[in-house]
Amino acid sequence: MGASLRIGNQRLLHHPRGNCASHLSARSRLAHILARWPFWLCAVIAAGIAWRVLDYILRYPVWADEASLCLNIIHRSYAGLLHPLNFHQVAPLFFLWTQKCIMNQFGTSALSIRLLPFAAAVACVPLAWLVYRPAFGPRSALMATALISCSLTPVRLACDAKPYSIDLFFSLIFVGATIRYLMAPARLRWLVVLCLLAPVAVGFSFPCIFVIVAASLAAGWQLWRNGKFRVLPVWIVLIGVAVLAFVMNYLWIIHPQALKTRSYMASFWKHQFPPHNLGIFWWLIKASVSEMMSYPFGRNYGFGLLLTPLCLIGVFRLARSRGNAWGILLAGPFVLTFLASLFGHYPFGGAIRLQQHLLPSIAILSAWGLRTVLRVLFHKPLDRRIARGVIIGAAAALVGYTFVQMPMDIHSPYGHGFRSMMTLRRIVHQAFKNSGGHTEVMAIGPAWRTARQMEPEIYWYLSTQCTVCNATLRLRKRPLENAHASLWILNFWLPKDASAGRSANQLIAHELAETGLHLHLMQNKVHYFGQLGFNYHQAYCQVEHYAP
């Protein structure tokens, strides 16, 4: 006996007789909330966005790959970006043009050059839930969303002025639109959405074409199996638009860039292309459990040994229970990327940043595989609560990992390489801090003949200052004749070239004496870089400051 609150036939609350005011204790209520997926969905989305925002506002120093691409953007016109890029760079045209527009409007600060990837990465967090929830249920969608939102690599790439976050964004959109079509094959609108987005996606992302082809094949398979030939013309238009967009992009952008960088890329990514012999089978096994599958922690820590089997279980279970179209959609990008690597066109495995177009498939297949395993282990109705608890616990663990990693990002996100880049940025900003017409900044390096031969980070920081840097060994006398003249000499040298570095200093000192200018040495300090650019694993910079 007791007091109850009912709405229709649903009893919402029940209070025992004589104790109507005694509700559930605060601890019981908290436990009830923590056991429900809506709370952890909010936690996952909040943690993923907060982590990305934190890394963005920390304004990490620009590293070599970012600097190499951004140097092409700031030194070229919109038409110039149609031509093959310098510094061994390749990038989609729409991405380059958008970045050019942003830099023209907002400048070349770290916040500006990373604005577009950051916006795409933040949008991916709630977008993942919207993509997976209708087809896979709340808990599998929660797990997949947590893997995308709270993994290290997608967060790092959110603050990288490269198109990797764009790859993930458009891949998620195409996977989501195709899922909606597979759920209701008679509806035309999702095929129309795919047709409209295909040329835009190809212009912003090179590897997105693998997802587009897989989505088109999945839609075609579903159309053939269901006999819904009313939508056949729209599907043909989708295939035509995707092929036309890719061919135009390939002829104008990809092929010219590939011709210029083919030898360098073949050497740099040689381990991500399979051998053309029987060793290809062992190579494929290693690639399938390599860094490409190392979520959530990134690098090759062995997590691919867990995620890869889960993905295989997930794709077979999905294809068996819902049809082959679902397997084609989610496993197709892997197969197509592997085929591209087989012909030497795109790396497979290895570098996780190049495989962001596979993350939508990895996230949901691993979540679906985990769900399948848990259903086998806990098949009794009373044990289903344990299975649900495991999924909630995995999402909670990823949220906890996020809040552990955020303070580490504040301290030192890239280890020794981060400290070297911070030192370089501080040196350059110090030299240009109060620069004007009476300031001369000289940058000297091993075997430098022009500024374009500098390491990308050095060239980027020097070329984005308000005063033009002097990259020759010849002093310009006019700026130094002012009573408030200031001369900064940044002499970069390697341990093996120490004698050349000292010779350059002596040459400048001799030339300074010949000019008759009365400048005195105010600062002379040597900085050590553990890692600088692609080539300098150990380097030094001697900073000299002269003033009247």
Image (cartoon, helix red, strand yellow):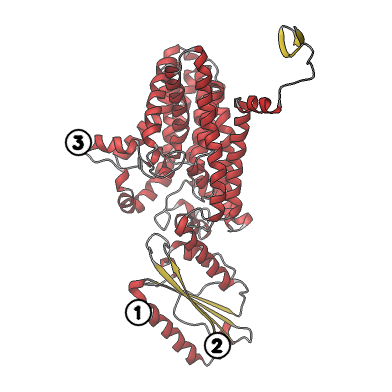
Q: Quadrant of residue 450?
A: bottom left
**Label 2 is placed on what type of residue?**
His
> Along the line of sight, which residue is nearer the eye, 175 or 433?
433
Q: Is residue 187 left or right of residue 65?
A: right
- Categorize mark 2 by other alpha carbons within 10 Å: few (<14), some (14-19), many (20+): few
Q: Where 526 sits versus 28, above or below?
A: below
Question: Which residue is tagged 2?
Answer: 520
Mark 1 against mark 3, which lies toward the viewer?
1
Residue shown at 56% from the left, 37% from the top: 399
Hey, what amino acid is under mark 1? Ser
N-terminal of the two: label 3 or label 2? 3
Please state which of residues 475 and 249 is positioned toward the viewer in this rendering: 475
As helix, strand or loop, the secondary structure at mark 3 comes to: loop
- Dots 1 and 3: beta carbons under 8 Å? no
Residue 496 vs 103, above or below: the answer is below
Q: Compare marks 2 and 1 and give the one earlier in the sequence.
A: 1
Q: Residue at x 48, y 65 (%)?
A: 459
Could you tell me residue 164's position as x and y percent? Answer: 48, 44
- 443 and 103: which one is in front? 443
Q: Are marks 3 and 2 in contact (CB under 8 Å)?
A: no
Q: Amino acid at mark 3?
A: Leu
Residue under numbered circle 1: 499
The residue identified by callout 3 is: 278
Give the position of the N terminus as an image quadrant.
top right
Q: Residues within 10 Å of mark 1 (few under 14, many from 20)?
A: few
N-terminal-most mark, 1 or 3: 3
Residue 4: image location, x then y, percent = 76, 11
